[in-house]
Amino acid sequence: MNDEEFRQAMQTLESYQQQLDNINRQVRLLQSTKDDCVRATRSMQALAEAKPGVDILIPVGASSFVNVTVSEKKSAVINIGNKISVEKDLNDAVAHIEKNIEEINVGLQKSLAALQEVQQYSQQLAKAVQAEYARRQQSAPSQ
């Protein structure tokens, strides 16, 4: 490997690291969004199953809960995209969010596959760079 190829390999390795960082951020964001959706569906399901007049705890985020009394009207306002929200029956709202979870799972699988692929390329290139570096250290004149 000549000097130019070695520099390019180092730059490519740096680029792979940036890609890995970006994909990891994307995976964390997707997982966080999925976790939020799962909590929302569980809360809505509990609310749908509760009898009117019963007090239940509903999570509101940040590991905090509020006490609510279940009413006869069992609906939720949910975001359906592009900053548009609609009121839906709780069962329909759960179905909508579960569909979103499925889409998030697809995105997670694709992101994890991309992560694995970039990691493999990065590891292969890192081994080649390390081998070249070791070769250069051995052939360098002693001082």
Image (cartoon, rainbow, N blue to C red):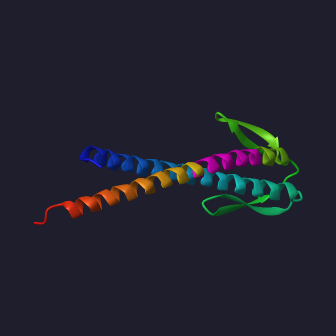
Residue 99 at x, y percent in the picture: 76, 45
111 in the magenta segment: yes
Lateral position of residue 18 relative to residue 60, left or right = left
Q: Which of 64 and 113 is in front in this view?
A: 113
Q: Majority secondary structure of the magenta segment?
A: helix
Instruction: Tell me what residue is drawn at x 30 percent, y 49 percent.
Output: 1
Whether residue 29 is visible to the viewer of this picture, yes or no, is: no
Residue 130 at x, y percent in the picture: 34, 60
35 in the magenta segment: no
Residue 138 at x, y percent in the picture: 23, 64
Would you identify the image quadrant in which residue 128 lies? Answer: bottom left
Instruction: Tell me what residue is drawn at x 30 percent, y 57 percent.
Output: 132
**Which residues are the magenta region?**
97-112
Would you identify the image quadrant in which residue 79 lies? Answer: top right
Instruction: Tell me what residue is drawn at x 46 percent, y 47 percent.
Output: 19
Instruction: Tell me what residue is drawn at x 81 percent, y 41 percent.
Output: 88
